[in-house]
Image (tube, coloured by chain):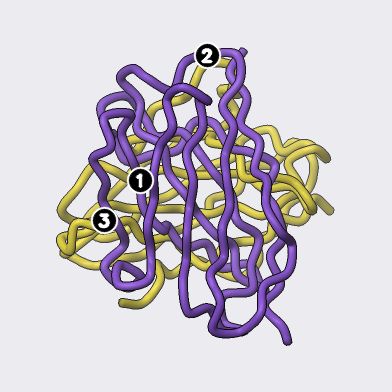
Chain colours: A yellow, B purple
Amino acid sequence: QSALTQPASVSGSPGQSITISCTGTSSDVGSYDFVSWYQQHPGKAPKLIIYEVSNLPSGVSNRFSGSKSGNTASLTISGLQAEDEADYYCSSYTSSSTLMFGGGTWVTVL
Amino acid sequence: QVQLQESGPGLAKPSETLSLTCSVSGGSISGTYYWSWIRQLPGKGLEWIGYIFYSGSTYYNPSLKSRITISVDTSKNQFSLKLNSVTAADTAVYYCARMGKLGRWFFDLWGRGTLVIVSS
């Protein structure tokens, strides 16, 4: 079972918006609204920033938003800030009754 | 606030059993949450290992199922992972995490993680 596909890296200037894609199949992203996104700074544990496609956990900045279309989920970061420089991972429930993660995307703030 | 903390040996020998414990503080492990183990392999990849409910019911990643045991000790507010027959491919940072209420498939609280190296 392959990981969900994410771009290895995405970059943007402060204040800009960027979008990270997470491509799966009809057996995971395309069939379930159990897509979540995590932010991970180097040497730290992942932090939940989006759950069930588009829901924002309490305390997470509303600069983060999530969506899904077909087999692809997306995370958008608006008003990019230096503190947003980190790895971002998506995950999805699958038809095999397990959870799969994406390979991660490093976001660079130029 | 609820916090999770992993503990256990940082080194395991090939073919032996890796044992880790997650201590839950600031809240009870008994309730509506499920509790998971996740590992992060070198080179970043995250892999969900399995979860347990305070009642003891478990569900494991099919790819690891034959080698995993997750248990809970409600009196100590802890849950544990045993992974047997380890190889170098099991070298990773191991995290314990809390799943969404009633087993919803996301992790809203994570421990700091503990690095386990498998080497002779």
Same chain for marks 2 and 3? Answer: no
Q: Chain of mark 2?
A: B
Q: Give the class, few, some or many, for how many residues have Cα within 10 Å of label 2's Cα (few <14, many ≥20).
A: few
Q: Chain of mark 3?
A: A
Q: CA distance from mark 3 to mark 1?
A: 21 Å
Q: CA distance from mark 2 to mark 1?
A: 18 Å
Q: Secondary structure at mark 1?
A: strand
Mark 2: which amino acid? Gly
Vertical side of B72 occupied by B114: above or below: below
User: Percent x, y for residue A85?
Assistant: 76, 48
| Label annotation for residue B51 | 1
Q: Secondary structure at mark 3?
A: loop
User: Percent x, y for residue A17?
Assistant: 62, 42
Q: Nearer the viewer, mark 3 or mark 1?
A: 1
Which quadrant: the N terminus of chain A? bottom left
| Label annotation for residue B60 | none
Same chain for marks 3 and 1? Answer: no
Q: Chain of mark 1?
A: B
Front-most of A61 and B43?
B43
| Label annotation for residue B27 | 2
| Label annotation for residue A29 | 3
